[in-house]
Image (cartoon, grey):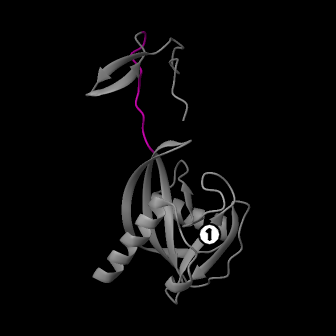
Protein backbone atom coordinates (compact mmCIF):
# COMPACT_ATOMS: atom_id res chain seq x y z
CA UNK A 1 0.00 0.00 0.00
CA UNK A 2 1.27 3.45 -0.87
CA UNK A 3 1.63 5.60 2.26
CA UNK A 4 -0.22 8.87 2.62
CA UNK A 5 1.72 12.08 1.96
CA UNK A 6 -1.22 14.46 2.38
CA UNK A 7 -4.14 14.51 4.80
CA UNK A 8 -7.25 12.90 3.25
CA UNK A 9 -9.43 15.22 5.36
CA UNK A 10 -7.97 18.69 4.68
CA UNK A 11 -5.20 18.14 2.12
CA UNK A 12 -2.33 19.45 4.27
CA UNK A 13 1.07 17.74 4.00
CA UNK A 14 1.50 15.16 6.76
CA UNK A 15 4.29 15.22 9.36
CA UNK A 16 5.84 12.33 11.29
CA UNK A 17 5.39 12.11 15.05
CA UNK A 18 5.54 9.55 17.87
CA UNK A 19 1.94 8.75 18.80
CA UNK A 20 1.01 5.91 21.16
CA UNK A 21 4.63 4.75 21.07
CA UNK A 22 4.80 4.40 17.28
CA UNK A 23 6.03 6.59 14.46
CA UNK A 24 2.92 7.77 12.61
CA UNK A 25 1.94 10.45 10.14
CA UNK A 26 -0.21 13.26 11.50
CA UNK A 27 -1.87 16.34 10.09
CA UNK A 28 -0.88 19.37 12.14
CA UNK A 29 -3.85 21.32 10.74
CA UNK A 30 -6.76 19.04 11.65
CA UNK A 31 -5.06 16.40 13.90
CA UNK A 32 -5.92 13.46 11.63
CA UNK A 33 -3.62 10.49 12.35
CA UNK A 34 -2.70 7.83 9.82
CA UNK A 35 -3.00 4.48 11.59
CA UNK A 36 -1.64 1.67 9.44
CA UNK A 37 -4.15 -1.12 9.94
CA UNK A 38 -3.87 -4.62 8.47
CA UNK A 39 -6.10 -5.76 5.63
CA UNK A 40 -8.27 -8.74 6.64
CA UNK A 41 -7.85 -12.00 4.70
CA UNK A 42 -9.62 -15.36 5.03
CA UNK A 43 -8.10 -18.69 3.98
CA UNK A 44 -10.14 -21.87 3.45
CA UNK A 45 -8.36 -25.08 4.44
CA UNK A 46 -10.96 -27.18 2.62
CA UNK A 47 -11.47 -30.92 2.92
CA UNK A 48 -13.93 -33.25 1.21
CA UNK A 49 -15.71 -36.23 2.78
CA UNK A 50 -12.61 -38.39 2.06
CA UNK A 51 -10.44 -35.95 4.08
CA UNK A 52 -8.57 -34.93 0.92
CA UNK A 53 -7.29 -31.34 0.94
CA UNK A 54 -8.18 -28.77 -1.72
CA UNK A 55 -5.20 -26.95 -3.18
CA UNK A 56 -5.35 -24.42 -6.01
CA UNK A 57 -2.74 -23.16 -8.50
CA UNK A 58 -2.78 -19.38 -8.65
CA UNK A 59 -3.14 -17.53 -11.97
CA UNK A 60 -2.22 -14.06 -10.66
CA UNK A 61 0.45 -12.42 -8.53
CA UNK A 62 1.40 -12.64 -5.82
CA UNK A 63 2.73 -16.18 -6.16
CA UNK A 64 1.54 -16.80 -9.71
CA UNK A 65 1.68 -20.49 -10.67
CA UNK A 66 2.13 -21.57 -7.04
CA UNK A 67 -0.07 -24.15 -5.32
CA UNK A 68 -1.89 -22.68 -2.34
CA UNK A 69 -5.03 -22.77 -0.24
CA UNK A 70 -8.01 -20.79 -1.57
CA UNK A 71 -8.81 -17.45 0.04
CA UNK A 72 -8.73 -13.71 -0.31
CA UNK A 73 -9.59 -10.33 1.10
CA UNK A 74 -12.72 -9.75 3.15
CA UNK A 75 -15.19 -7.25 1.76
CA UNK A 76 -16.94 -4.50 3.70
CA UNK A 77 -19.90 -5.73 5.68
CA UNK A 78 -19.03 -9.43 5.77
CA UNK A 79 -17.72 -11.53 8.63
CA UNK A 80 -14.48 -13.46 8.28
CA UNK A 81 -16.49 -16.68 7.99
CA UNK A 82 -18.69 -15.23 5.24
CA UNK A 83 -15.64 -13.95 3.38
CA UNK A 84 -13.93 -17.33 3.64
CA UNK A 85 -16.93 -19.16 2.16
CA UNK A 86 -17.47 -16.45 -0.49
CA UNK A 87 -13.85 -16.73 -1.66
CA UNK A 88 -14.17 -20.51 -1.83
CA UNK A 89 -17.30 -20.21 -3.99
CA UNK A 90 -15.80 -17.48 -6.21
CA UNK A 91 -12.58 -19.40 -6.90
CA UNK A 92 -13.89 -22.98 -7.10
CA UNK A 93 -17.73 -22.94 -7.09
CA UNK A 94 -17.58 -25.12 -3.97
CA UNK A 95 -20.03 -24.58 -1.14
CA UNK A 96 -18.93 -25.65 2.30
CA UNK A 97 -19.42 -25.25 6.00
CA UNK A 98 -16.90 -23.88 8.43
CA UNK A 99 -15.84 -26.57 10.86
CA UNK A 100 -13.33 -24.63 12.97
CA UNK A 101 -10.89 -21.75 13.19
CA UNK A 102 -7.35 -23.02 12.57
CA UNK A 103 -5.52 -19.84 13.48
CA UNK A 104 -5.02 -16.10 13.14
CA UNK A 105 -1.79 -14.88 11.55
CA UNK A 106 -0.11 -11.60 10.69
CA UNK A 107 2.08 -11.11 7.63
CA UNK A 108 3.64 -8.21 5.74
CA UNK A 109 3.33 -8.92 2.03
CA UNK A 110 4.19 -6.87 -1.03
CA UNK A 111 2.26 -5.16 -2.55
CA UNK A 112 -0.46 -5.14 0.12
CA UNK A 113 1.47 -4.42 3.30
CA UNK A 114 0.11 -5.63 6.62
CA UNK A 115 -2.35 -8.56 6.45
CA UNK A 116 -4.41 -10.13 9.23
CA UNK A 117 -5.14 -13.69 8.06
CA UNK A 118 -7.87 -15.88 9.52
CA UNK A 119 -7.67 -19.54 8.47
CA UNK A 120 -10.69 -21.82 8.75
CA UNK A 121 -11.20 -25.54 8.25
CA UNK A 122 -14.04 -25.91 5.73
CA UNK A 123 -15.84 -29.15 4.89
CA UNK A 124 -17.55 -29.69 1.52
CA UNK A 125 -20.00 -32.46 0.60
CA UNK A 126 -20.00 -31.90 -3.16
CA UNK A 127 -16.44 -31.64 -4.48
CA UNK A 128 -17.22 -30.83 -8.14
CA UNK A 129 -14.83 -27.94 -8.86
CA UNK A 130 -15.27 -25.19 -11.44
CA UNK A 131 -12.41 -22.67 -11.29
CA UNK A 132 -12.56 -18.95 -12.08
CA UNK A 133 -10.01 -16.61 -13.71
CA UNK A 134 -7.93 -16.41 -10.50
CA UNK A 135 -6.78 -20.03 -10.83
CA UNK A 136 -5.01 -22.26 -13.34
CA UNK A 137 -5.97 -25.48 -11.58
CA UNK A 138 -7.57 -26.89 -8.43
CA UNK A 139 -8.13 -30.31 -6.95
CA UNK A 140 -8.58 -32.43 -3.85
CA UNK A 141 -5.54 -34.52 -2.97
CA UNK A 142 -4.63 -37.11 -0.38
CA UNK A 143 -1.49 -36.11 1.51
CA UNK A 144 0.86 -38.45 -0.38
CA UNK A 145 -0.21 -37.13 -3.84
CA UNK A 146 -0.53 -33.42 -3.03
CA UNK A 147 1.37 -30.88 -5.14
CA UNK A 148 4.01 -28.97 -3.19
CA UNK A 149 2.64 -25.88 -1.45
CA UNK A 150 5.59 -23.49 -1.07
CA UNK A 151 3.91 -20.34 0.25
CA UNK A 152 5.23 -20.17 3.84
CA UNK A 153 1.99 -19.01 5.48
CA UNK A 154 -0.05 -21.67 3.69
CA UNK A 155 2.43 -24.33 4.81
CA UNK A 156 2.08 -23.05 8.38
CA UNK A 157 -1.73 -23.20 8.14
CA UNK A 158 -1.50 -26.78 6.84
CA UNK A 159 0.78 -27.79 9.73
CA UNK A 160 -1.46 -26.05 12.28
CA UNK A 161 -4.53 -27.79 10.81
CA UNK A 162 -2.79 -31.14 11.13
CA UNK A 163 -1.98 -30.36 14.78
CA UNK A 164 -5.61 -29.40 15.44
CA UNK A 165 -6.81 -32.64 13.84
CA UNK A 166 -4.39 -34.77 15.89
CA UNK A 167 -5.67 -33.19 19.13
CA UNK A 168 -9.32 -33.94 18.34
Residue 95 locus on image (x, y percent): 59, 75
Residue 87: name its quadrant: bottom right
Residue at the (69%, 64%) spot, across then down: 135
**In the displayed structure image, the side of residue 153 where residue 139 appears, left or right:** right
Residue 141 locus on image (x, y percent): 57, 82
> Is 22 situated above or below 48?
above
Q: Is residue 81 visible?
A: no
Residue at the (38%, 77%) spot, across then down: 162
Please name whichever residue, 106 or 87, is drawn nearer the observer in this view of the structure.
Answer: 106
Q: Secondary structure at mark 1?
A: strand
The magenta segment:
29-38
> Is 81 situated above or below 140?
above
Residue at the (44%, 55%) spot, across then down: 117
Q: Is residue 114 visible?
A: yes
Please name whichever residue, 30 or 38, is drawn nearer the observer in this view of the structure.
Answer: 38
In this view, which residue lies farthest toward the bottom? 50
Could you classify mark 1 by the number of other residues whose Cα lies within 10 Å: few (under 14), some (14-19), or many (20 or more)? many
Residue at the (54%, 14%) spot, across then down: 11
Mark 1 lies on residue: 56
Residue 16 locus on image (x, y percent): 39, 17
Q: Is residue 82 magenta?
A: no
**Quadrant occupied by the C terminus:** bottom left
Q: Magenta part mainly helix, strand or loop?
A: loop
Residue 72: name its quadrant: bottom right
Residue 57 locus on image (x, y percent): 64, 67
Q: Is residue 37 magenta?
A: yes
**In the displayed structure image, the side of residue 119 where residue 142 appears, left or right:** right
> Is 158 situated above or below 78?
below
> Is 38 situated above or below 91?
above
Amino acid sequence: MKPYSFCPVCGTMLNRAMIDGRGRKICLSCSWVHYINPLPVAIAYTVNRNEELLVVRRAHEPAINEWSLPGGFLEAGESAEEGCLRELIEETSLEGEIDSLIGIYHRNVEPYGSLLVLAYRVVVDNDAISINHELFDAGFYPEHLMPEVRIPLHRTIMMDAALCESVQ
